[in-house]
Image (cartoon, rainbow, N blue to C red):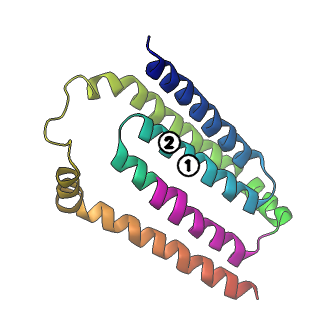
């Protein structure tokens, strides 16, 4: 094993550890702004992992869209709603049964995804290796889901503004 390969392994495990660490800190933090910063750090480490895997385009998307734009939107929502920790804990206690159902469904989906991953990578996809081909697929074949995601983010921001105005 060459020194480049050893360095890549060390960097991979370091970035993986950082992603897991900041994800756990985000979940366990009682301060919402700190949680948003931990989220940004975790998303940055994922961008580093994508770059390490030679997925430069995905790494840049992760960096600009998730670590940049989404984190800023989350911070704006936190600052506009001004929800206290006590009120948030009361809300979460009322929704704990619903959260358990959602976690169970997502866990089953994750297990199905992990078991089916070998089928997904059994035959490599031909023609999706350039940014132009990816853009054609994203903006022609999957245009409606792409636009729906932006509408959902806009609705969330408008809802946060409404809740902030209502609280005043």
The spot of residue 80 in percent (x, y) is 69, 78
Tell me, for residue 123, which label it has, or none. Answer: none
> Relative to 21, is 112 above or below?
above
Q: Which residue shows up at 19% across the image and 43% down it?
A: 128
Q: Secondary structure at mark 2?
A: helix
Residue found at the far top of this picture = 1
Instruction: Report the residue marked by disc 1.
Output: 44
Q: Which residue is mark 2?
A: 48
| 23 lies left or right of 45 | right
Q: Is residue 153 left or right of residue 116?
A: right
Residue sitting at x 58%, y 41%: 103
Crowd around label 1: few <14 · some 14–19 · many ≥20 (10 Å): many
Q: Is residue 7 above or below residue 15?
A: above
The percent coordinates of residue 144 (x first, y second) are: 26, 65
Q: Secondary structure at mark 1?
A: helix
Q: Residue furthest left?
A: 127
Q: Is residue 46 visible?
A: yes
Is residue 98 visible from the viewing direction of this image?
no
| Label 2 Cα crowd, 10 Å radius (few <14 / some 14-19 / many 20+) | many
> What residue span does the magenta drawing correspond to?
63-83
């Amino acid at each position: 094993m060459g020194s480049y390969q050893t360095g890549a392994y060390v960097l991979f495990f370091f970035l993986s550890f950082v992603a897991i660490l900041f994800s756990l800190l985000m979940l366990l933090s009682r301060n919402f702004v700190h949680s948003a910063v931990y989220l940004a750090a975790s998303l940055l480490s994922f961008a580093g992992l994508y770059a390490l895997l030679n997925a430069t385009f995905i790494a840049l998307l992760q960096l600009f869209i998730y670590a940049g734009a989404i984190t800023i939107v989350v911070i704006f929502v936190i600052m506009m709603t001004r929800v206290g920790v006590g009120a948030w804990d009361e809300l979460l206690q009322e929704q704990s049964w619903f959260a358990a159902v959602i976690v169970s469904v997502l866990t089953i989906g994750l297990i199905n995804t992990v078991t089916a991953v070998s089928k997904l990578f059994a035959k490599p996809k031909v023609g999706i290796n350039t940014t132009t081909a990816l853009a054609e697929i994203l903006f022609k074949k999957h245009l409606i889901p792409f636009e729906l995601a932006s509408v959902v983010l806009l609705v969330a921001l408008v809802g946060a503004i409404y809740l902030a105005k209502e609280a005043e």
